[in-house]
Amino acid sequence: MIGSNDNGAPDGIEFKADLTLERLKPRLEEVWRDSGIDEAQRCEFERRLRAHWRPLFEILFRLYGSRYDFHYHIERILQTAAAAWSDRPAELRSLDRHRINEPDWFQSEKVIGGALYVDLFSENLVKAREHVGYFQRLGLTYLHLMPLFAVRPGNNDGGYAISNYRSVDPRLGTIDDLRLLAADLRRAGIVLVLDFVFNHTADDHEWAQKAQAGDREYQEFYYLFPDRTVPEQYEATLREIFPTVRRGNFTWHDGMQQWVWTTFNSFQWDLNYGNPAVFRAMLEEMFFLANVGVDVLRLDAVAFIWKRMGTGCENLPEAHLLIQAFNHLARISTPSLLFKSEAIVHPDEVVKYVSPRECQVSYNPTLMALLWESLATRQVGLIMQTLRHRHRLPEHTAWVNYLRCHDDIGWTFDDDDAAAIGIAAYDHRQFLNEFYTGQFPGSFARGIPFQENIKTGDMRISGTMASLAGLEQAIEEDDEAKKELAIRRMILLHGVTLSIGGIPLLYLGEEWGMLNDYEFVTDPAKAGDSRWIHRPKMQWDYLEELNDHIDTGNGSIRNRIFKSTQQLISLRKELPALAGQNMELINTFNSHVLGYLRIFEGHRLIVLANFSEEVQSVEGNKLRTAGLGRFFEDVIEDKTFVTSSPVELEPYQILWLKRV
Ligand code: GLC
Ligand code: GLC
């Protein structure tokens, strides 16, 4: 199935690439003739095609060169790319030209992200358009709408079991509603992020239905096996992602009398990218989304898209080649489109997806997990040890820094990073699971287990940011001191993700301190998946409370969380030092205080973050050596300090320090 596995370029590959392109010219002419595109636009495309063709061809050759039908697929891929450019709306073409000249736009301190489920936030897309003002009020400039495509009936894994990539779930609206929302957002200076769920389709997607009807061409879109022999061989080296759904990675299909590869839920069928027809079919879906007006595609479950016997079938070199191929094609036909990687895997692997040739931006699951780790331990040793050699990224890329998302928290730190500072990784993960499920004595957290694996002892955590940070427990106990600490923990965490380098991403609801929603168990389509606990419905009446000046119990807590979050966001936008990715750790000589320096084009900002509920102090002259002068001010609270005396941090306080 695989063309060539070696790392060197195949012999004479450039010659082969050039000759192939020459031979395909007439096919390209056909597309141009049918589309009536003008000469200038044609040249634009062909210029980019020339720039990307050789590396693209080489990748496709390595993946598919040994297939009998390689040339046919190459031809179709080129035609698909040309058609995508000729179908591209004029407004998006002009955005393409703009972004080509400003490729680092996403590194600006002005970029702030938010993510939401349309149904839970505003019921549907038409109503979402009425809330663009809300996004602006909060300061968002990047909006990720959780998958909103047509899905299978019943359980659809929060939209990740897609039955048609070109139509919107009718409960949410239509594709035209989505286009209108995209246009409204663009006018409001907000980029649109949607998922590209390309590892699997739902079992009722047209391709899967044809496979079920016995169509051989479509059966080859998936991994099907008549008996357990081959699945057993694969199982020997695979992990289980959803062990409480089903043991193993394969599901028996009665109709076809075949085992189907299903990494996630049994109704999510993994696509077989060993077949170039799958690559091309998905490419068409990608271009369709790009031309609707999507700015960033979130590449879902990237780690799993290539399988090879005898491996864990995660993060294989071919997975990277596939993304690079999609990326070259995007650069050619829809150049303003960026990719965001969703690889929730070991930190060594996460970073391999991040490059201008692959995914320009990536979730930062390691930072996310370690911020929660620091809150639980009140120590910054592991986060420092990790960030020291793991925060840096290639140029023209960025982290997406988040605290919670629609998924669970997995403790994805590196065992050797932990060992280096005397932490036993397995025990530490057990501790963190106990802590965040509230079982550890004195824990403030109210999370619940996700996908506990009895065999391996592995477990992940579900829960909203506020419930994990202690607010739920504090409200239940009606304990003012605990409420105060919980709110401070939330502000502290936001203060870090907003300043550490990269795009901060809020999971909407966080700005109000939304608590766990235990109601999900009453819906049979959700009951089996504890992640629904942290996917609550937006409460629009909270917005009215914002204008109440009288303290109304929980209302005033929400006000405070909202206003502090909003304030930090608008402060970040005024601080050029927070652009880019450059971040240097500062040794604060205090194991509870995280310190780092941000520098961008001569602007500097020092951040100090106290992860404990005690007052902590840091010697002022340590900060002086990090480049502050004699006097400096905390821009969050407008307070001035002198470096000749110790800097005191209140419990969970975060300082953003600027030279005065
Ligand atoms: C991604 C999504 C997750 C989903 C899985 C399968 O990891 O974030 O919610 O369950 O893919 O699509
Ligand atoms: C695993 C996968 C990730 C997925 C998550 C869902 O961590 O690596 O892709 O989002 O499970 O829980």
Image (cartoon, rainbow, N blue to C red):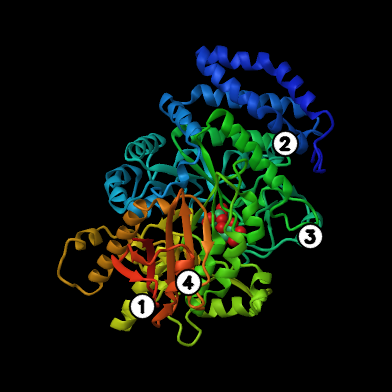
Q: In front of the other: label 2 or label 3?
A: 2
Q: In front of the other: label 1 or label 4?
A: 4
Q: How many residues crowd mark 3 within 10 Å: few (<14), some (14–19), many (20+)?
A: some
Question: Whole-percent x and y of residue 641?
Answer: 34, 70
The answer to whether 337 is drawn above or below residue 513 in the figure is above
Q: Which of the 4 image quarters holds residue 221?
A: top right
Q: How many residues crowd mark 4 within 10 Å: few (<14), some (14–19), many (20+)?
A: some
Q: Amino acid at mark 1?
A: Glu
Q: How many residues crowd mark 2 within 10 Å: few (<14), some (14–19), many (20+)?
A: many
Q: Amino acid at mark 3?
A: Glu
The residue singled out by tag 4 in the image is: 622
* Circle 2: element type: helix
Tell which circle, 3 or 1, labels the residue nearer the N-terminal end: 3
Label 1 CB-ligand 2 distance < 8 A: no
C-alpha separation, residue under disc 1 versus residue under disc 2: 54 Å
* Circle 1: element type: loop
C-alpha separation, residue under disc 2 versus residue under disc 4: 50 Å
In front of the other: 593 or 568: 593
Tell which circle, 2 or 4, labels the residue nearer the N-terminal end: 2
